[in-house]
Image: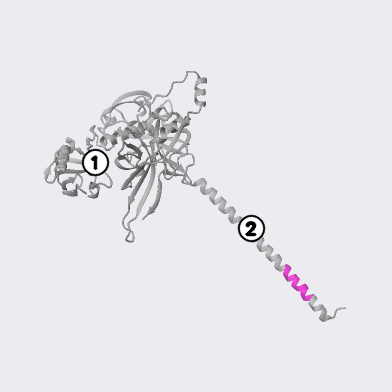
Amino acid sequence: MLSKVDSFPSKLYFAENIDSKINLFQSRRSMKNLSIVLFSSVLSAVLAIFLYRMIEEPQKILIKETLPVKQVDYTPPKYESTNRAKLNAIANTPDFVKAASIVTPTVVNIKSTQKSDYFWGRESYGASTGSGVIISADGYIVTNRHVIEEGDKIEVTLNDKREFKANIIGTDPSTDLALIKIDGSGLPNLDFGNSDKASVGEWVLAVGNPFNLESTVTAGIVSAKGRNIDILEDQYSIESFIQTDAAVNPGNSGGALVNGSGELIGINTAIITRSGRYEGYSFAVPANLASKVISDLKEYGEVQRAILGVNIEPVNNDLAEQLGLPSVKGVHISKISPKGSADLAGMKVGDVIVKINGKSASTMPELQEQIGRYRPGNIISVQFYRDSKLRQTKVTLKNKNNNVAMSANHRDEFLLELGFDLRNLVPSEEKRVGSQGVKVVSIYRGSKIERTEMDPDYIITKVNDVRVKSVEDAVKALKEARDKVLLEGFYENYPGEYYYTFSKRR
């Protein structure tokens, strides 16, 4: 029998047990509340990410790999005329092994290095890498402008591991293309194919030579043609890309897009992505446009850009119905430049262009691509609708200065060594500036001329006090100079004379 004293501990234990249960209950309730809060937080985060992904615009990326900062006309084979034969031909996968063996040796890796200013007393360097395609046995290489534009030194590594230094021949911001050259002979090279004959659904290969991966080959199909993704910022930009789902990643920019026969039909340039990596949307400059641009850069050092002299807009359903068009296709002229190409050919505001030289121009990118293939002075045939009737006219294309003259660059190995290209002034320029001389067309990075801080469009009037009236005069005077060279001249849009000096021996 327990005494009152004996029973006290028992009652105390019972009280402690109740407190423990109360604490346990409160703890469980707190844990439950915490779980609800955590669950709500996770759910809110997931919903936020989902909504962000739904709303976020995908990135449009010019494909270039940044390195860490350190201190020809192609005619395809003819198929049988029956639908069955065509379907069988499409169903048969092209010989990718053979095509890859043709293309891979011609695709190179390009490393562009830029020297930065001193930082904390030490020099620093930035670099990026991309790909390029050898298009001649003597070392001309086509790539993207954004691959090499920031570089002071351009290095090229061939598929067989040989390394070369490259010179920039010319660049074109309107298509994001560039032409560089290495000193070589007997190099494997690839001809431009006919991109007009590439069909949606056709098998293609994308071949690149990205940093540290050597040549890579991926396969896909042509997803679309004439794509405009609004990625180039130049006033006269031409975006009429071939879209493909062949895998293209950073470092492949400037590489080759080829058909099943190994013909070059495009230069890989950009991707659209949410993650910054390939997601199925790759874009290439069509070979027919690239061929003309590269030919201009090689021959003139700059692109001979022809323009139609119009402002344009796409045709939509309402406009097609209003103008009585047979279909919702074509490019509507909203404004015409006085005395421009279209104006002199009799075209008017309200006309709807549908074909250029018999080839489709039913969208703005298609029209821009077609015009981009021609030079000032070329005569083209334009089909257009006016008053619901199909009409045709001949148009003589002009340049942005509203004349048919082309730049007359003089490409000389001696000038190339000094680091610039020159051309004679045309009569209209001589009249406008009131002087004779030669104009600097382009300046190569890292060259003697580039180090003088001269800018393109500089007009040289004297070399070491010898007056020059032509490129031949300038070359002669430069060659006769023993070492120090003093150039005297001016810029058309800036007052006063400008002087530049350099040493031929350094």
Q: Is residue 84 magenta?
A: no
* Real-space Cα separation, disc 1 to disc 2, in angstroms: 73 Å
Q: Is residue 46 visible?
A: yes
Q: Nearer the viewer, mark 1 or mark 2?
A: 1
Q: Nearer the viewer, residue 37 or 14?
A: 14
Q: Tell me which corner region of the image, top left, top right, bottom left or bottom right, holds residue 18.
A: bottom right
Report the side of 99 relative to 305 (left or right): right
Checking the image for residue 404, the label placed there is none
Q: Residue at x 25, y 47 (%)?
A: 450
Residue at the right extreme, as displayed? 1
Check the image and report above or below for 37 versus 7: above
Q: Secondary structure at mark 1?
A: helix
Residue at the left extreme, as displayed? 466
* Residues shaded magenta: 11-21
- The secondary structure making up most of the magenta span is helix
- Residue underneath mark 2: 36
Q: Secondary structure at mark 2?
A: helix
Q: Looking at the picture, how far across and down is residue 9, in whole percent?
A: 79, 77
Q: Looking at the picture, how far across and down is residue 59, in whole percent?
A: 45, 45
Q: Amino acid at mark 2?
A: Ile
Q: Looking at the picture, how far across and down is residue 476, in whole percent?
A: 15, 39
- Residue underneath mark 1: 416
